[in-house]
Amino acid sequence: MIDDYIRATMTKNQIPGLSVAVVQQGVPILVKGYGLANIEHSVPATEHTVYEIASVGKTFTATVTMMLVEQGIISLEDAIADYLDYLPITWQNVTIEHILSHQSGIPSYTDAPNYWEITHLDLSKSEILALATHLPLKFQPGEFSAYDNTGYYLLGLILEKVTGQSYGDLLQDRIFAPLGMNATVMNNSSDIVPHRAAGYRLPNSKLVNKPYYSPSVTYSAGGQLSSVEDMVKWEQGLCGATLLKQSTLDKMWTPHPPNQGDDWEKLRYVAGLGWWVFNYGDRRVVGHNGSILGFASNITRFIDNKITVILLCNLDKISRPDAIAKDIAGYYCPALKEVVLQPPLGEGERE
């Protein structure tokens, strides 16, 4: 029955390939691929297929950041200017916590007017940041919330400065190797990556190959490759509090409303620390979408129902990956079928 739903959803959205994992109380009960990882070569999508996971990778960046917080190496209250030089004066009061909870007010470089003119260029990190450094703050830090890729890009630089390691090596040493996530790496288009999926777009309802999108643009804001098989290991690490204390995870999965925000009860979702916290009444639900040229992804953790759904696919801009995840969860936890789906995240929050 679940196979029928997934295939029907793929047909409706014209998704070439989709890999799905369902994990219940830390135990994988569905880990499977559907459709094609590569249309031109008729390569089936499987649990081993490797996709660009885009902003789902922000959960990795946040996790390493919180590891350093646990160690006392950095503090959430630290200003980013304590670690990075040559920042705009208006960014001086932005803290690490502001960035993790998307309350920095720093404009996202992906919103720059010329952004789509540079995505095919392999630029330096300073050139990427220059897309945003001359723009005014959207609001004073902590006042409101607005999705911000620039902040997570800056976090990568801070992590490198503090540890003396490259961001990719840091993820490998702190997350991927300990959890046995052997297929999860930073994206590099020149690397030979076993089981790498081809990415597709759907202009005018016709599938086409995605254009080149430079990994320099994503970095610590969502530049990883992974498979659902590996993402199951990530989920098991979260379930078992393998990498972080449970108290730290609980803090990351707690709503952090901005100063000028409405009461939590009135919000459909709000940022935690590295995760979105969805307001499903008294149910704890956290997750993250990812969207990039050629790929879309989602992880949704229904914490109180002890079920997590992970979706990776090779088509961008699919309709509501979080809605698909909720429907899939409902097949295994019927109580979730009665829960009304929250309105969609704004377009920026999907990146």
Image (spheres, rainbow, N blue to C red):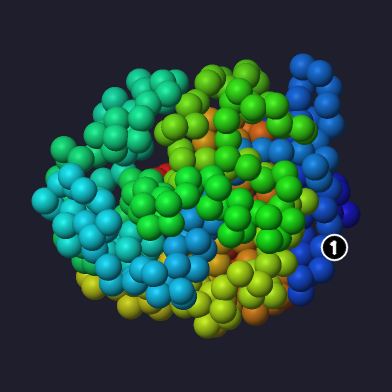
Displayed quadrant of residue 284: bottom right
Q: Identify the residue at horizontal 53%, vertical 52% (top origin).
A: 170
Seen in the image, is 91 located left or right of residue 159?
A: left
Seen in the image, is 337 located left or right of residue 65?
A: right
Query: Does residue 246 sit above or below 114 in this rendering?
Result: below
Number of dots carrying numbers = 1
Q: Position of residue 67 (x, y in %)?
A: 50, 68
Q: Identify the residue at horizontal 46%, vertical 38% (top origin).
A: 218
Query: From this viewpoint, is residue 296 visible?
Result: no
Query: From this viewpoint, is residue 226 visible?
Result: yes
Q: Position of residue 121 (x, y in %)?
A: 41, 21
Local secondary structure at mark 1: strand
Q: Identify the residue at horizontal 56%, vertical 52% (top origin).
A: 171
Q: Which residue is mark 1?
A: 29
Displayed quadrant of residue 300: bottom right
Amino acid beneath label 1: Ile
Q: Position of residue 215 (x, y in %)?
A: 49, 32
Seen in the image, is 255 located left or right of residue 204?
A: left
